[in-house]
Amino acid sequence: MSYRVVMIGAGGISRNHLDAIRQLGPERLTAVAVADPDGVRGRDVAAQYGLAYYPSYQEMIVQEKPDIAIIALPHHLHEECAVFCAAKGCHLLLEKPMANSSASCDAILAAVREAGVALMVGHTQHYLPANRQAKALIESGRLGKLVAIHDTRHKAYFEEERPRWFLEKEKAGGGILMNLGAHSIDKIQWLTGRRVTKVKAVLSYEAPIGNVEGSGVVLAETEGGIGAVIVQSGYAGVAKDETELIFTGGMARLVSRQGLWISSGGEYEPVEGDDAQGAESPFASQLYDLLDAIEHRSEPECSGEYAKSVIAVLEAVYRSQATGVEQVVD
């Protein structure tokens, strides 16, 4: 069966989704339209991919009657848009973070249940080949028991080309921790198969623009007592995205978009394997997962309930910064 798909939001990430739709091919998915209030941006994406353009996603949903809506809007608009699309019978692929609050996540989940549609949240860390290798390594017990994780992510976050809404707490929900920290929390939970239960956070607010945090250090604890440290900076410096996994019998170095290296006591050595280099994009992989959920009436790997757990951790991070003390994740 082939499904008709619409794209809501024509920002940079929209091209990743539309390229992935092309990768699956028209026998599975066909993109038919894009909506964005910015006419220049929306029409540019529409022309590039041969789509109809709408300034209003509501009008697009009513006119096009799509099977699937991909939502890539500013975070504070996720709830309103997802609830509307679900009520019109659309299956949903919602960009992460799921929403700005657990309450908004609950509203989306309620709408999805009432409409009987599938919901997937775009936590693409699950579909990167090196990450899948790391998860398999943990589950194999090859290096013993996993006892600690050190996740570091640095990226110039306040560059001119970043849309301004990312730097407004009311719209984005937070800064680098809400945006990239969601990846780190998801990675820790998914790799370990355990939810984060406690956090202690120290954030900084030193950016020249906006009212969101520019860096953060988070000490997290998972179910079962695995400790994890997340360190992120959006200030000037060297870009970095690396996760160190510490076992009782060795260590692993994970660079999600490059590969996995392990050490049993000496220097790191690369892990080889068929899965090391994946031709399929993570955006295509998650579409396959969504289609499987639709056709088998099952929960996708990145379900709404799971994505809500990431938001609950982020809420605890911001509570910890505000209070100065460790917070239990609700």
Image (tube, rainbow, N blue to C red):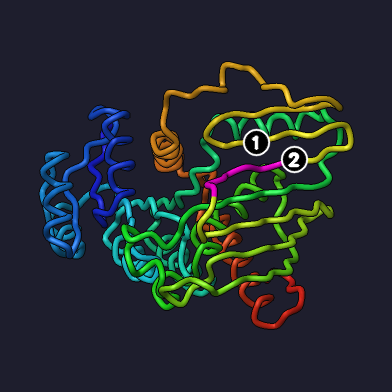
Task: Tell me the SS state at disc 2.
Answer: strand
In which quarter of the view is residue 133 placed?
Answer: top right
Residue 125 placed where, x, y %?
A: 54, 42
Where 186 sits versus 99, above or below? Answer: above
User: What amino acid is found at the position of numbered circle 2 in the picture?
Assistant: Leu
Q: CA distance from mark 2 to mark 1?
A: 8 Å
Which dot marks residue 254?
Answer: 1
For image coordinates 15% across by 40% down, the residue present is 48
Residue 49 placed where, x, y %?
A: 16, 39
Residue at the farthest bottom position: 323
Residue 135 placed where, x, y %?
A: 67, 35
Q: Which residue is mark 2?
A: 245
- Residue 125 is covered by the magenta coloring: no
Closest to the observer: 65 or 140? 140
For image coordinates 82% across by 30% down, the residue present is 141
Q: Which residues are magenta?
A: 238-244
Quarter that holds the N terminus: top left
Main SS, magenta residues: strand
User: What amino acid is found at the position of numbered circle 1 in the picture?
Assistant: Leu
